[in-house]
Image (tube, rainbow, N blue to C red):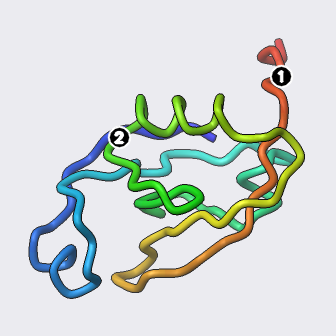
Amino acid sequence: MEGQTTPLDPALARRLGLAGRSAVLVVAVEADSPGAHAGLVAGDLIVDFDGQPVAGIDALHKLLTEARVGTRVPLVVVRRGESRIFPVVPAESRPPQR
């Protein structure tokens, strides 16, 4: 998955009860990746990983390295203004294909 830190619209955050001011915008999802298997699509906003708020891409990377590889965890995503939960199974990083 390719993502970037993005600010959350304050009205959307209030309506959904989100504490954070920013999230991770999903820019692209690699085929056959944990994100693809979970159902993520470009444009999703990742706001929570396994009960931990995700304020940006650095925070998400930190949470992913602490996650137990192969264990299903809930990922809270905002899609089209609605909060959704996707189960994701983190995997070991793969080197980029050339």
The answer to which of 73 and 92 lies nearer the viewer is: 73
Position of 98 relative to 28 (above/below): above
Type of the residue with mark 1: Arg
| Left or right of residue 21, residue 30 in this image | right
The answer to which of 37 and 28 lies nearer the viewer is: 37
Number of numbered labels in the structure image: 2
Q: Quadrant of residue 65?
A: top right
| Residue drawn at 40 percent across, 85 percent down | 82
Position of 66 relative to 85 (above/below): above
Mark nearer the viewer, 2 or 1: 2
| Residue drawn at 46 percent across, 58 percent down | 46
Position of 12 relative to 3 (above/below): below
Mark earlier in primary sequence (2, 1): 2
| Residue drawn at 54 percent across, 31 percent down | 61
| Residue drawn at 24 percent across, 51 percent down | 22
Residue 85: x and y, percent?
59, 77
Tag 1, which secondary structure? Answer: loop
Q: Quadrant of residue 96?
A: top right
Tell me, yes or no, if residue 43 can be seen here. no
Task: Tell me the residue that label 1 is attached to.
Answer: 94
Residue 66: x and y, percent?
64, 33
Task: Tell me the residue that label 2 is attached to.
Answer: 56
Type of the residue with mark 2: Gly
> What number is the disc on residue 66?
none
| Left or right of residue 75, residue 4 in this image | left
| Left or right of residue 37, residue 45 in this image | left
The quadrant in which the C terminus is found is top right
* The residue positioned farthest toward the left in the image shown: 10
Residue 39: x and y, percent?
72, 67
The quadrant in which the N terminus is found is top right
How far apart marks 2 and 1 lie (CA) works out to 22 Å
